[in-house]
Image: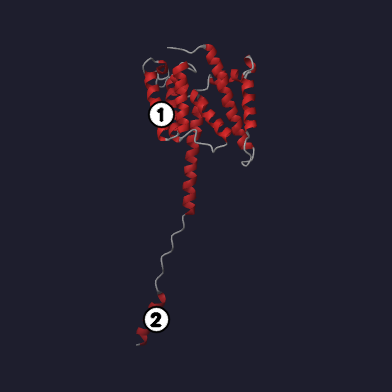
Amino acid sequence: MNLPDLSLQILYGRLGWAIVLATLACALWRRLVPQSAQMSRVALATVLAVSLAAMALPGELSPAWWLGLAFQYPSGLLVGCCLLRLAERWNGIRRSQAMPQALAGVLVVVGALLYIDAVGFLARGFYYAGFGAAAAPLFGIVAALGCVLAIVRGHARGPAASLLGALALFALLRLPTGNLWDAVIDPLLWGWAVVALLAAALRRTGRRASDRVAEPDPAPAPGPALQPLATEQFSSLKE
């Protein structure tokens, strides 16, 4: 088990939580301000600077202290996804899908397995395998190769680059905790994945409902030609 230096952990925690807080503040800006009003670079830089200054406060004055008590450290993947959002806002480009459904599904399943293993329902030691000398590097190499392949093929390049950065941070500095699972998932990221899947399911349900409403009613079958039939019967009676 190779743990990171404590000073590096503290520095990473403050920087990581500052990036996450700035991303949340920008998301609130998008919700509260009309859609036509775009966040300027000056406003974005101000939000990021305030977040960094708040996290740099000493001891219990820093929000990072309380966030660390509740969530420990943000995963490298969460920080990478937040950096992706901030970079998109800085460049003024359309937001990409930082949490695609495939990634969200994997995170939800992995997080659920780790949770039920931690509370004792499975007791297979899945979390402690993230400290392993063989399993963790093997999983990291396979995941890194998958990220490189996705980037080369142009599939979800942003999330793939974020995951690759998280794996590189773990491989080089063992951050955030020396456990591979903590580098790729955390409670906030797991909650984000759950919300993303629920939102996608609601959108699909809404589209299906709207498609059913938009479908025209089938045209009624044409009725029998009563007038020619009545004329034919009248002619036969007359004869």
In the rendered image, which quarter contains the N terminus? top left
Residue 201 in view here? yes
Residue 119 in view here? no
- Crowd around label 1: few <14 · some 14–19 · many ≥20 (10 Å): some
* Marks 2 and 1, the one that precedes in the sequence: 1
**At 51% from the left edge and 31% from the top edge, which residue is drawn?**
192
**At 42% from the left edge and 32% from the top edge, which residue is drawn?**
151
Spatial CA span between label 2 and label 1: 81 Å
In this rendered view, identify the residue nearer to me: 65 or 7: 7
Q: Quadrant of residue 136?
A: top left
Q: Position of residue 126 (x, y in %)?
A: 40, 20
**At 42% from the left edge and 25% from the top edge, which residue is drawn?**
113
Which amino acid type corresponds to the residue marked 2 in the rendered image? Thr
Look at the picture and state if 158 lies above or below 130. Answer: below
Residue to which mark 2 is pinned: 231
For label 1, the SS is helix
Q: Quadrant of residue 181?
A: top left
**At 37% from the left edge and 20% from the top edge, which residue is drawn?**
138
Q: Residue furthest bottom?
A: 239
Look at the picture and state if 70 lies above or below 213. Answer: above
Residue 93 placement, left or right of 229:
right
In the drawing, what numbered circle is on residue 148?
A: 1
In this rendered view, identify the residue nearer to me: 192 or 122: 192
